[in-house]
Image: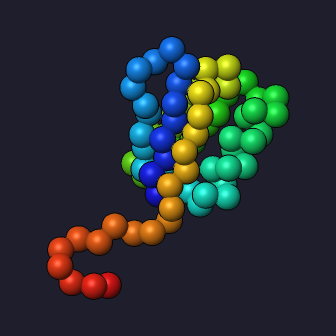
Amino acid sequence: MEITIGIRDVARELVLESNQTPDEVSAAVAAALAGGAALELMDTRGRRVVVPTGSLGYVEIGSEDQRRIGFGTI
């Protein structure tokens, strides 16, 4: 699933692929905004992404649909 994070005063977005479900990501964002110091997410390669809560502009959570490759249907 693709997650896009907008950071205040930064022109580029932070985009990462994650194996977390949309509900898990949404819960992590809500917990960070409710009083946490930072939003922490894991990407598909096992790297931890940490964004200070005060710097968050927005978080866009993509769908869980798998990308199709080639011409065949899965």
| 38, above or below 21, in the image | above
| 47, above or below 11, in the image | below
Instruction: Locate the C terminus and report the quarter of the image it occupies.
Output: bottom left
x, y percent for residue 72: 21, 84
x, y percent for residue 71: 17, 79
Q: Quadrant of residue 29?
A: top right
Q: Which residue is found at the position 44% from the left and 33% from the top?
A: 14
Q: Which residue is found at the position 61% from the left and 58% from the top?
A: 22
Left or right of residue 28: residue 57:
left
x, y percent for residue 28: 69, 44
Closer to the camera, 16 or 7? 7
Name the image colouring: rainbow
Q: Which residue is found at the position 51% from the left and 30% from the top?
A: 6
Closer to the camera, 74 or 8? 8
Task: Please identify the residue farthest to the top as the structure is shown.
Answer: 9
How many badges with numbers are in the image? 0
| 56, above or below 67, in the image | above
Closer to the camera, 11 or 21? 11
Task: Please identify the residue farthest to the right as the structure is shown.
Answer: 34
Q: Quadrant of residue 47?
A: top left
Q: Is residue 63 visible?
A: yes
Q: Which residue is found at the position 55% from the left and 19% from the top?
A: 8
x, y percent for residue 58: 59, 34
Task: Please identify the residue farthest to the bottom as the structure is shown.
Answer: 73
Q: Quadrant of residue 23?
A: bottom right
Q: Is residue 43 visible?
A: no
